[in-house]
Each structure stands twice: as structure tokens, then as C-alpha cells.
Image (spheres, rainbow, N blue to C red):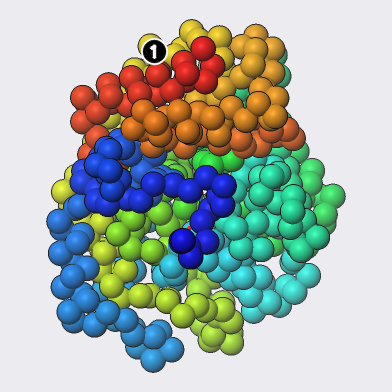
Amino acid sequence: MSHIFPRHTKALPPVVARADGAYLYDTDGKAYLDGSGGAAVSCLGHGDSKVIGAMKAQLDQVAFAHTGFFTSEPAERLADRLVSLAPEGLDRVYVVAGGSEAMESALKLARQYYLEKGEPQRVNIIARRQSYHGNTLGALATGGNIWRREPFAPLLIDVHHVAPCYAYRGMAPGETEEQYGKRLAAEIEAEVQALGPETVMAFVAEPVVGATAGAVPAVPGYFKRIREICDRYGILLILDEVMCGMGRTGTLFACEQDGVAPDICAVAKGLGAGYAPIGAMLCSAEIYAAIETGSGFFQHGHTYLGHPTSCAGACAVLERLVDDQVLGRVAPMGALLRGALEERFGQRPYLGDIRGRGLFLGLELVAHRESKAPFDPGQGVAGKLKKAAFAEGLICYPMSGTIDGQRGDHVLLAPPFILTEDQVGELVDKLDRALTAVLG
Ligand code: PMP
């Protein structure tokens, strides 16, 4: 009998035995194409010798040292490298063990920043209804994912949720992308006004919405308007790049494509590429200076801050992405995969929308293409599709997410950047068989 506490107690997964490149293998020898990099994690695929070598060398040197006593060479090197690659203004790096920790750190830093500045009344967070920022209570409260929040609602802090930028469903008939972006920005500004601008601490968003909706980027200009609103009222812009960052959309940071830089940014997943549990919060020099010249201590912390072995792994991941130019594969391979998806599925009656950026793509599945009516959640389309794809030897990420107020199904694809042309074909073929098995 197993003593592991599994994700689903009624559906135990197979045991993974090994992994190589874009494939994982179970103990029966069955191969699975990693079409979602787990949950948009394995950007380099499996068995990357450079990352493994760097981590092994660090383990021999010093595996762990607590940041209450030491900093370490790999942590310093990672911070330097991230700052050199980050959007302008981000100047300090706080290294944690994952995405939720990065987001909790971001929220608490925002609060402490305003305390240090003598603005203790700034407590309100504005976030979007279509978002996921992690499963710890603060991050969960900030996210808008209905089914994740529901059981824990009584434990969650108040966060003010506004409409997401979701062109497929949100744009009014006849409205241009520009008009849509302006309308949403006006709604956000109205929310700021209603709360009282001097009480608002932060606006939080994923530049490309991940797990909740399946790779939804904003329309051009949307984030620039948000940046302007934040600047106008002294509100911090916190961007959650845990899923869409680290090259997944074709640029190291997704927000580069929106032409904005946040005050605080959270990254994780691709930063460790699955080799190390790691995340990071980056903040501006101004925020850091408020702490430095104030109390001198960010009143937060976790045991595995700046973990040396994880940092050595993340440094090697960045070398692979940037110096070895693996990042350069994302745009062309993403275009290839998107084209293949559009050609194969574009006209299917259940295919509502194909969207995303780079190798971060989403397919929204609907009961009626014209009306865009989602499937009844009772049908469990996403769950069935995950099962059918797995049986075909494909790992993809179907979810019953939140499509602004109601449940809806989508599939998220986030394969390793090392994906080959043949594997693009294999992914589409396997997904086709799985979709056909579930939806006909
Ligand atoms: N933010 C986003 C955008 C995410 O996609 C996730 C994980 N899916 C998180 C935060 C939480 O990260 P973790 O699971 O590593 O805690």
C-alpha cells in the first residue's frame, strides 16, 4: 500500500521511471510526449547535461547554507544575471522556492514598502477575475480562479477583482482592440477611484494568463494604460510571470512584448526548468531603497531562500536559454505549432479560440462555436481530455478554468523549447486522437 498523499486519491498516476528530451517514461516503458512541460515548467526538456552538471558541482561544493548566515556565489550570480536580463528598473532579486512563495513575497513587500514610506493606509489590492497567482492563502486570495478559491473563501483576504483582458469573450461587437483596451483601463481607473487612490497598494496581473484560461495575452496597449494608471496614483504594478516568463512567450519576460516594466515581478517554473524548485521576486531599486533606508529588514523569509544548489541550476538554465540561444527556438517553433493547430483544429465545431504567444498556446473548447457557449461543467470535458491524451502518450494541460464568471474548458500547451518539427506533428496527431475520442 502506498503512503504517498496523491493529488487525486481516486485516480493514482503511473510511476515515472526516467525522462529524456521531450519525453517521460513510466515503469512499464510507455513514452509520454511532454506537451505541457508538466505545468509549463520543463522549458529545456529532460536530461539537460549542462544544468545537471552545474547542480552536481554545486552539491559537491556546498548544497545549502541558510540566508540568515550566508549568501552564496550561485545566488549572487543568479541575481546579477537576472537583473542584467530583466526589464528596466528591476534591480534586486529575492530568491525563493517556487511561484506561490514569489507571489506572497511580492504582496508582502508591496505592503512593507508603503509602511516604510509612511503610507500605511495603502492596503487594497486590485487583481483580475481570470487569474491564478498560487495556492497559498495570500496568492489564492489574489487570484480569481473560482473553483480553486471556493472552498477556502472564508479564509481569504479581500481583494478587488476586475475584468480580465480577454478578447475572445470580452470584446463587444464592433469594438476595436484599442477601444476594448481603453474601456478596460477606464474600468480599472474607476475601481481605483471608488476605493480611494490613496488606499490602493498594487495592481496584480499575469501578462499572459496561464492555468485559469489557457494562454490569454492582453490586447496591444492594455498594459501600457495600466502602467500609466499605476504611475498616476502611485500604485505598484506587480506582474506574475511565474508561468509565462523565462522565455515561454518568445522573450525572456513576457511583459517585454507589452512594452512595460513592473515594479515587482514574480518568476518561477522555467527558471529552474524542473531541475530545481526555485522562484524569484524581482523589485525596483526604489522599493529596495525604501527597505534599506527604513527598517533595513524585509519582514518575511523562508528556509530555502537563495538555495545554492537551486541557484546554480537556475544560472545554468539562463545560460542555456540565453547564451546557448535555446530561447531563439521559441518564436519559430511556436509559430509552427500554432499553424499546425489552426490547420488541424481551426474549423472543428468545438474549437472556440486558438491563442497565445510563443510556445505558450491555448485552445478554448466550446459546446457551440457561434454562441461561444461553454460545455456544461458536469460533462467534465477537460478531465476526460487529459485522460484521453495521456492514454495516447501525450501530456497536455486541459483545465476547467474560469472564463470570467463561469466555468469553461481549455487545453494549455507549453512544450519544451527543444521540441522538433517531427514532435510538433506528433503532438498535434496525439491531441487530435484525444479530442476525437472525447468530442467526436
Ligand atoms: N502564478 C502563476 C501564474 C502560476 O501559473 C502558478 C502555478 N501554476 C503560480 C503562481 C504558483 O506557483 P507554484 O505552483 O510554484 O507555487
Where is residue 70 drawn, in percent x and y? 35, 88
Is residue 417 visible in this depiction of the protein? no
Above or below, 390 against 62 in this view is above
Where is residue 334 drawn, in percent x and y? 33, 29
Q: Which residue is mark 1?
A: 344
Q: Residue at x 35, y 23 (%)?
A: 430
Which residue in the rendered view is the most extreme toward the right? 194
Give the residue type at disc 1: Arg
Q: What SS does tag 1 mark? A: helix
**Is 220 situated left or right of 199 in this image?**
left
Q: Nearer the viewer, residue 151 or 242?
A: 151
Above or below, 258 against 44 in this view is above
**Is 41 situated left or right of 330 in this image?**
right
Which residue in the rendered view is the most extreme toward the bottom? 69
Is residue 111 visible in this depiction of the protein? yes
**Is 288 situated left or right of 312 in this image?**
right
Please identify the quarter of the rendering in which residue 53 is found: bottom left
Q: Nearer the viewer, residue 85 or 382?
A: 382
* CA neighbours of label 1 inside 10 A, class few (<14), some (14 to 19), many (20+): few
Which residue in the rendered view is the most extreme toward the front? 1
